[in-house]
Amino acid sequence: MKTSIATVSVSGNLREKLEAIAAAGFDGVEIFEQDFIADAGSPREVGALIRDHGLEITLFQPFRDFEGLPQGPLRDKAFDRARRKFDLMQDLGADLVLFCSSVHSEALGGIDRAAGDFAELGEIAADHGIRVGYEALAWGRHVNDHRDAWEIVRRADHPNIGLILDSFHTLARGIDPETIRRIPGDRIFFVQLADAPRIDMDLLYWSRHFRNMPGEGDLDVTGFMRAVMAAGYAGPVSLEIFNDQFRGGLPGSVARDGYRSLVALMDDVRRAEPSTGVDLPEFPARVTVDGVSFVEFASRGKEAEDLGALLAALGFTRVGRHLSKALTLWQQGEIRVLINEEPGDFAGSVYNARGTSVCDIGLRVGSGRDTVARASALGGEPFAQPASPGQLDIPAIRGLGGSLLHFLDSGQADVWSAEFETLAEAGEGAGLRRVDHIAQTMTYDEMLSWSLFYTSLFEMAKAPMVDVTDPDGLVRSQALQAGGLRITLNGAETHRTFAGAFLAESFGAPVQHLALESANIFATAEALAARGFDPLPMTENYYADLMSRFDIDEGMLEALRRFNILYDRDENGAFFQLYSRPFAGGMFIEILERRDGYAGYGAPNAPFRIAAQKRLMRAKGMPSV
């Protein structure tokens, strides 16, 4: 299977685009005419440059407003333009061009009229060694359905005229992609893919600004591509993405995301429909996650002591010390927290760059090797560093912000006894049982990328994106869940928000808060109070508002107020939240209890929690020391 991407999908000038596309692993590139015209190189020079990057030109595009023009100057000029483009393509070394359905105000309808134009064009194209692919634009004046475009190609009946299919144009109009299965695969010359969020708006505007990578939106791109492959298509699979956010992104990042999305999509297609014979190297399927094995902080000196004191106040016990590293293990229930003060390894470099922060997350999976193998096939970056004496080899990859994800399976189950000296047994602590979720903070522009990272690697469900109101702006939040793993992605649009300030202060630290589950939050709050835990204080106004919104027993309301516990309820059940005060530049710990199937994250409470946190942080305008 040849992978391809349109240059319009990636930011930068043509040369920057080509460098990023080649580095991401693509086999070929669609040359968008505007990118070519803006480059100073001649057609032969640009063609040589592309091939020097190890790429082939899979398509030259677009040619607009060709078919259906009335006899006379307009039609004559369209054919003249086509001849000129064919000459240019010969110099480039490209043999396939995209003709999109006309939107010209003087274009005439009629399947036979359009077919006649393409039959005549086919003769000219054949003389130049060029193939022409016809695509139905979703907003085409007379042709906006791939079924009509195919009928035009069929009636043109010329070997140099074929069909180009684009998932957006089919799916955005709600056309059943199963109809593609009836089209002969050898008459489909090219396939372009794009996903998009479901938005009720003008089709042209939707297409030009909101396309995204397969898997990042709401369209059934997998179903579309299954139908294409079942038809017998054997050509390149290409991305054509128009997206304002991507236009301002880094070329390398956008290209890597594109490659990841394309390979993950085609892997889904071959698993759903093995008879299509998708030609991809074999690699493991999406991984299921049992839960979080550990969370590791990079820290040092007094900051490490303060972090240990916070863990102790939360009911954790210092249960182990690494045999060869300055690494301590704290535990409560199934929750393991590591404090790494080793100056010479990865955690040491993280601390030097960011101060106390989460540098590593360990996940329990069925097979760590399979997880890394899938991540590598999707363009992920495996991680390794020299092992200390007695240290187990645990598979790992790079995650958000350069942090690490380690994958522990049954082969590493004894890591805690093998690598750590036992200092104490973990007691009941304060009743915390497991990690409920991990909240990762990033810029808003990175959210689609990291959502794709997780959903292409793990068997993971996405919740709808929600807006979280901060006194100084909005933060976009999206929850992802894979088995025993919950992750919330929080995208900050400005450094003035609490999330944005944390990102700026920590130089991009990936984890802002850990949410820990309690079996009984009131019992936990009692135990924490006895240990001297200092919770995030909530206002009396908050509890007065609770009384107006919910029917809460007076005794429970008093307990909520006494322990600074927040409350929410939906049609399934109730939710309780208790927070630590901010530490290490804006990190915090959340303690929660879910009752009777509550599956959310307490979004209605977020503005009040953020306001309370910001009251305890450095005043606006005050510089850090």
Image: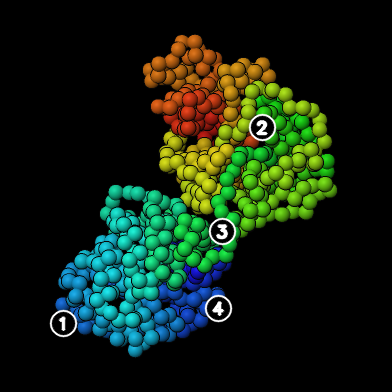
- Mark 3 against mark 1, which lies toward the viewer? 3
The location of residue 294, given as percent across then percent down, is 67, 39
Tell which circle, 3 or 1, labels the residue nearer the N-terminal end.
1
Residue at which label 2 appears: 334
Q: What element carries label 1?
A: loop
Q: Distance between the residues labelled 4 and 1?
A: 43 Å
Q: Residue furthest front?
A: 275
Residue at which label 3 appears: 378
Residue at which label 1 appears: 72
Q: What residue type is labelled 4?
A: Asp
Q: How far apart are marks 3 and 2 (CA)?
A: 31 Å
Q: Badge 2, how many Cα within 10 Å: few under 14, some, many 20+?
A: some
56 and 2: which one is in front?
Answer: 2
Q: How far apart are marks 2 and 1 (CA)?
A: 79 Å
Q: Distance between the residues labelled 3 and 1?
A: 52 Å
Tell which circle, 4 or 1, labels the residue nearer the N-terminal end.
4
The location of residue 115, given as percent across then percent down, is 23, 76
Residue at which label 4 appears: 52
The location of residue 146, given as percent across then percent down, is 29, 65
Is the residue under label 2 in contact with that under label 3 (CB below 8 Å)?
A: no
Q: In this view, does 371 lie above or below 601?
A: below
Q: Which residue is drawn at the image coordinates 53% and 47% (left, top)? A: 459
